[in-house]
Amino acid sequence: MSDKVNMKINGIEISVPADYTILEAARENGIDIPTLCYLKDVSKTGACRMCIVEIKGARALQASCVYPVSEGLEVYTNTKKVRDQRRVTLELLLSDHDRKCLSCPRNQKCELQTLADELGVTDIPFEGEMNEYDIDDVSPSIVRDNNKCVLCRRCVNMCKNVQTVSVIDTMERGFKTKVGSAFDMNLADTACVNCGQCIISCPTGALREKDNTKEVWDALADENKVVIVQTAPAVRAALGEEFGYPMGTAVTGKMAAALRRLGFDKVFDTDTGADLTIMEEANELVERIQNGGKLPMITSCSPGWVKFCEHNFPDFLDNLSSCKSPHEMFGAIIKSYYAEKHGIDPKSIFNVSVMPCVAKKFEAGRPEMECEGLRDVDAVISTRELANMIREAGIMFNKLPDEEFDQPFERASGAGVIFGATGGVMEAALRTAADTLGGKSVEEIEYHGVRGVDGIKEATVNMGGMDVKVAVAHGLGNARKLLESIRDGKADYHFIEIMACPGGCVNGGGQPIVSAKDKMDKDVRVERAKAIYSEDKASKIRKSHENPDMIMLYNDYLEKPGSHKAHELLHTTYTDRGLF
Amino acid sequence: MAIPFKGTKEQEEQLKAVIAAHKGEKGATIPVLHEAQDIYGYLPIEVQKMIAEGLGVSLAEVYGIVTFYTQFSLNPKGEHPIGVCLGTACYVKGSGDILEKLKSILKIDVGECTDDGKFSLDATRCIGACGLAPVMTIGDDVHGRLTVDQVDGIVKQYS
């Protein structure tokens, strides 16, 4: 335990760990200090001056998010001086803000709006010049509207320090200061990987996903289209938050019911695609190990990670598994096997993927992601966009019954579900590879060494008498560290899982927005992962290769993992995209 | 950008040597940018990319620094660099109008260079010729006691 110090906040004596900031000390003791630029573990710059407090003996008001506690410190968070100055600062910020809140995608989920309410802003007395920026909506994944930017730099710190993607920074100075890319390039023209972590870091509507709901509504209204939806494992673990459920509540049944009521012709589970990915990926791993193929093999489910690799680590492209990601695989199977089996013209099928991710929007548009001229997936919407559609349709989510996914793919395995959390793909692959390499069904299927939120996790797993060394990294900064250690010859593994987003898909860039305040109190990655692991635990089938749909699919159609047919439909290639 | 990059192999070698000399130093970007601007005269995207890749920092960060400090220029200087003094004396004598006139004749903004590479335009601080206010410089020539009507004719002398 770290040492404690005694201090006073608003006259109340408290004792807190010596490494706390005033902000942390106050929050732990039930005192809320407003913040804007502060984001736990991401951004701590003391720039916005919202969290200022009065400190006895200090000359000026101090930013509590960066001010360390000390013995005997006396702090006042709620004096007239503090309140007045916070309000003026906020009014000045708002004076150069595009205040079209009613039509803003962050309406009612905006931290700036909440602050204006909480700090009692009733008027913006400062009128003057306003910056006017073009909206950058060229990227298929992310829209940047600098007219709504408050220059908090949370997105910059996320992109630069956590993800080490570093395609945005602050430009110019003074009144002209803005966040953007070098030479005013559109995000789409940079090495942006579309992870969308900037979106879920942004306190306002300056960053948002490219909205694809219109295409989906149009397809649903088109009688000539068979509209098939699939939902990723992480969506069920977070969608409930949009409708008032506590974080970590799995809403699988209600989600299936809602999708059916939206009018989708078939409601499928991307977990089936995940099982299929495992069939192919575990086979690829075993083949690479047995036939001296390129190792370590690295997972390719995360399109943010794939693009990051294509820009920053082109020397590792041969290490990437050739497997398409689960929803792309499943999309290809729907338009081939499923269409054939049910006598549906594949051209009439419109595949919609609901994803916790905005990079999936980019991925779905990659030229490789098609078969015989048919796109694997026609539209990708995020968890947030699905929630918007449910609200727009007047579906009372909380009153929905729990329903099942549609046949014939209603029985995904627990291994498919855990894809949504960091370490999940690894664990799912190990469950299948262990049986394949050992030649028998292994009982011990929970690999706790690869679970949890440590940035880089390592484990050695004995499979069929062979020690297989594995590693898991989540968040691209951790991925960079891991790959550099391999490049430098300091580490070597057989198999690596990498997810672009910290915590994996549960904390993806397309997931419900969690405010900086809530992030101070709970770890989003941990809470949402609970929903995923409990669904796995409750599954009767917990290994991908034991999923009867997989057995049927391979018997009827694909023959065996890695077959010619499987390669045509389920595998892909990568491109060296250059550093910039 | 209108002006094509005309960097030579020699300039690239010089820049590489500068980057190698500073690599690994804390805060290397600004001194490298200074030296790069000495080598090339300005800091176009090609040069910034070499610096970003060479120092292992992002292009966005390099560009952020270049646009923060006014000493750094994204545009080359013209064959005849024009400077309009916006010091107090010149300004009250109407150098702001002179500057606007130049912008409209040359069709460029302050800090930019014409497409043919002939003229670049800068707004300067006091150049110490207050007695001649308002003043502009073209290359090493000083033109004083200017009126807006004269500007066109003076520029034509250099075209």
Image (cartoon, rainbow, N blue to C red):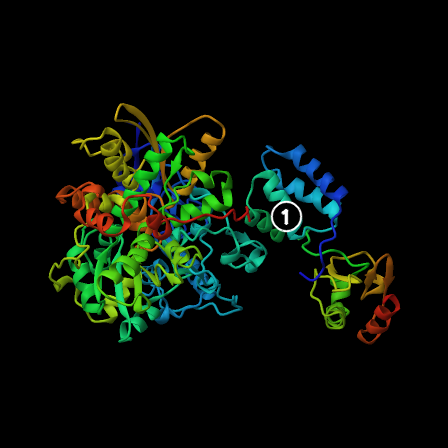
Count up the numbered dots. Answer: 1
Q: Quadrant of residue A404?
A: bottom left
- The quadrant of the rendering that contains the N terminus of chain B is bottom right
Above/below status of A437 relative to A205: above
Q: Secondary structure at mark 1?
A: helix
Residue A432 placement (x, y as % from top left) = 24, 37
Q: Is residue A469 left or right of residue B102?
A: left
Q: Residue at x 26, y 30 (%)?
A: A437
Whether residue A529 is visible: yes
- The quadrant of the rendering that contains the C terminus of chain B is bottom right
Nearer-the-camera pick, B1 or A304 = A304
Q: Residue at x 41, y 28 (%)?
A: A492
Q: Quadrant of residue B142?
A: bottom right
Above/below status of A61 relative to A99: above
Nearer-the-camera pick, A9 or A569 = A569
Nearer-the-camera pick, B13 or A408 = A408
**Which residue is under mark 1?**
B48
Residue A28 placement (x, y as % from top left) = 26, 42
Whether residue A455 is visible: no
**Dot 1, crowdedness within 10 Å: few (<14), some or many (≥20)?**
many
Residue A414 placement (x, y as % from top left) = 19, 44
Which chain contains the residue that carries disc 1? B
Q: Amino acid at mark 1?
A: Gln
